[in-house]
Amino acid sequence: MNTIGKTLLELRKQKGISQEMLAIDLKISQSSISNYESDTTKPDIGTLQKIAEYFKIPVACFFDEKTTPYANEQNESKNGNTINCTRIILSEKLIDLYEKKIIFLEEELRKLKEK
C-alpha cells in the first residue's frame, strides 16, 4: 500500500533530487521531507499542495492506494522522463474537503487583493 511518504520518496527519486534540494525548492526543512518520507509525520494540506504542484501531479496521487507515480510528458525527471500517477479515485469526503479548502483559499486571496 502506498503512503504519502512512499509516494513522495518515489517522486523525488524519479526526479533525481536530494531531500535537501527538494526542501530548498519547497522552502521547508530537509528534516520535514525526511519525516514525510518515513511517514513519521504527514504534510499539512498546504504543503501537500505545494509538493503536488512541484511534481505537477494531482494531490489525489498521494491518497489512492492503487496509484503509482510514473513518468509521462507533463513533468520531467532528471533523466528526461516525467512523473505522473495512474488511476485517481477520490472519495466523496476527500473531494468535499478539497472543495472547502479551495473556497477558503479563494476567499483569503480575494481579501488580500482588496487590501
Image (cartoon, rainbow, N blue to C red):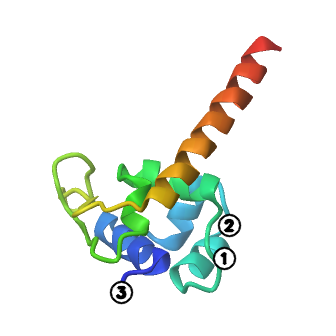
Within 10 Å of disc 3 (Cα), the crowding (few <14, some 14-19, many 20+) is few
Residue 101 appearing in the image: yes
Q: Against 41, is 76 above or below?
A: above
* Residue occupying the point 51% across, 62% down: 22
The amino acid pointed to by label 3 is Met
Q: Which of the two residues, 105 or 24, is positioned nearer the viewer here?
A: 105
Q: Residue 1, labelled with which disc?
A: 3
Within 10 Å of disc 2 (Cα), the crowding (few <14, some 14-19, many 20+) is some
In the image, residue 36 lies at what x, y percent?
57, 76
Please report contact status of discs 1 and 2: CB closer than 8 Å, yes or no: yes
* Residue occupying the point 42% across, 67% down: 62
Disc 1 marks which residue?
Answer: 31
In the image, residue 47 lies at what x, y percent?
61, 57
Circle 3: element type: loop
Q: Which of the two residues, 57 or 98, is positioned nearer the viewer here?
A: 98
Circle 2: element type: loop
Disc 2 marks which residue?
Answer: 29
The quadrant holding residue 89 is bottom left
Within 10 Å of disc 1 (Cα), the crowding (few <14, some 14-19, many 20+) is few
The amino acid pointed to by label 1 is Ser
Circle 1: element type: helix
The quadrant holding residue 69 is bottom left
In the image, residue 79 lies at what x, y percent?
20, 62
Residue 25 appearing in the image: no
The quadrant holding residue 68 is bottom left
Instruction: Say whether disc 3 or disc 1 marks the residue closer to the N-terminus.
Output: 3
